[in-house]
Amino acid sequence: MFGFLKKQFVDVIDWIEKPGDLAWRVPFEGREIQNGAQLTVREGQVALFVNEGSLADTFESGLHRLDTANLPILTSLMHWDKGFTSPFKSDVVFLSFKEHQGLKWGTGQPVTVRDAEFGALRLRAFGSYSFRIAGVDTFVERVVGTLEGVTVASLEPQLRAAIQTAIATALGGGGVPFLDLAANQQAFSDRIRVEVDKAFAQWGLECMSFYVESISLPEEVQAHLDKGSSMRVLGDLANYTRFQAAEAIEAAAGQGGGSVAGIGAGVAAATALGGAMAQGLGTTAAAAPAQPAEDPIATIEKLHKLVTLGALSQEEFDAKKAELLSRIR
C-alpha cells in the first residue's frame, strides 16, 4: 500500500480502502516521510496530517507532493526553514466519506409507550439506515484518537444503542396511535431520523437515510387484536345467522331434491348454528316470538301447489296431508 526507499524512508503514501472501512492510520513504525514524497488521495477520501494529537494539514482527493509548500501548518508547527530537505515524522490518517448503506437496526428489548387507544404498549421495531463521516475534527477526536483504524462493524453496537434511544423518544412523544403507525410509517421514519442524526453528530457522523420496516406488538397482545378484528368482520350476529340460514337452505335443497324434509333440515341446522354462536360469544339469544297456530287446511293447499310445481312428490304430499288431517279434531 505504500513503498519505502532505502534507509526506510516513506516515498509513496496511499490507501486502498476495503468495504466497511472508515479510517486508517498509516503504520510508519518508526520510519520517516521523505521530503517530496508522493501522497495519493482517492475520490471520497481525505488525508490528515496529525502533529502531537492536533490536526495540521488536510489533503483532498488528488496527487500531492509533500514539501514545505504543501504542508504550511505542519511547517509552521515544526519551525521548518524554507530550505527543509530532510525526512520528517508525522501521523497520517486517511478517512473515507463513503456512505455506508443497508445497515440493520432493531429494538433488542421492547419499547414501552403510552398509546392513545390501548394504553401502555410494548413495541418492537426493525429497519435499516445509512451514514457517513461529516465532521472531520469531531470524528478524529471522539472516534479515531490513537486507534490504528476504525470500521463500521466496530461502531455498529454504539450506533444501534443511539438509535434505540431515539426510537423511544420518537414513539413516546409522537402521539400517533399504534394502528395508525403503518399509514404514517414514512413520517414516523423521518421523525426518528431527526433524533438519530442528533445522536450521530456527537461522533462527527451524519445519518443519510433511516427506514422503519416493521412495528410489532408482543404475540399475546397481537392475538387479542386479531380476535377483535374477527368479531368486527362478522358484524351483527343476527345478520350473520340469517346469512348462514340462507346458505344452509340452499345447500339442503340441492342435496335433498327440494323436498320439505331437506329444507326443514337446512333451517334446523342454520338455527342451531346461530344459537351456538350466540352462546360462544357470551350472549343470550332472545326468545323467538310465539308462532301463530298452524292452519292444516291452508298448509295442505300450499303443499298441493308444490306438487303442481314439481317441487314435491305425490307420495310426500300424501304423507304430509295425512299427518295434517290427523291434527284436526
Image (spheres, helix red, strand yellow):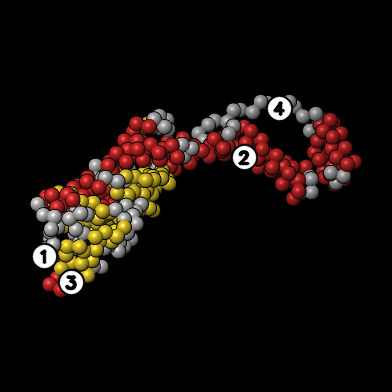
Classify the position of the C terminus by image quarter: top right
Helix, strand or loop status at disc 1: loop
Secondary structure at badge 2 equals helix
Earlier along the polypeptide chain: callout 3 or callout 4?
3
- Give the percent coordinates (x, y) of residue 313: 85, 46
Mark 1 neighbour density, 10 Å: few (under 14) some (14–19) many (20 or more): few
Please tell me the numbered disc located at residue 272. Answer: 2
Task: Find the distance from the CA under tag 4 to the CA under tag 2.
Answer: 18 Å
Q: Residue at x 66, y 35 (%)?
A: 242
Q: Which residue is mark 4?
A: 291
Q: Earlier in the sequence, mark 4 or mark 2?
A: 2
Does 218 appear above or below 10? above
Secondary element under disc 3, as helix, strand or loop, is: loop
Label 1 vs label 3, nearer the camera = 3
* Residue 5 numbered tag: 3
User: What is the x, y in percent for residue 211?
Assistant: 41, 45
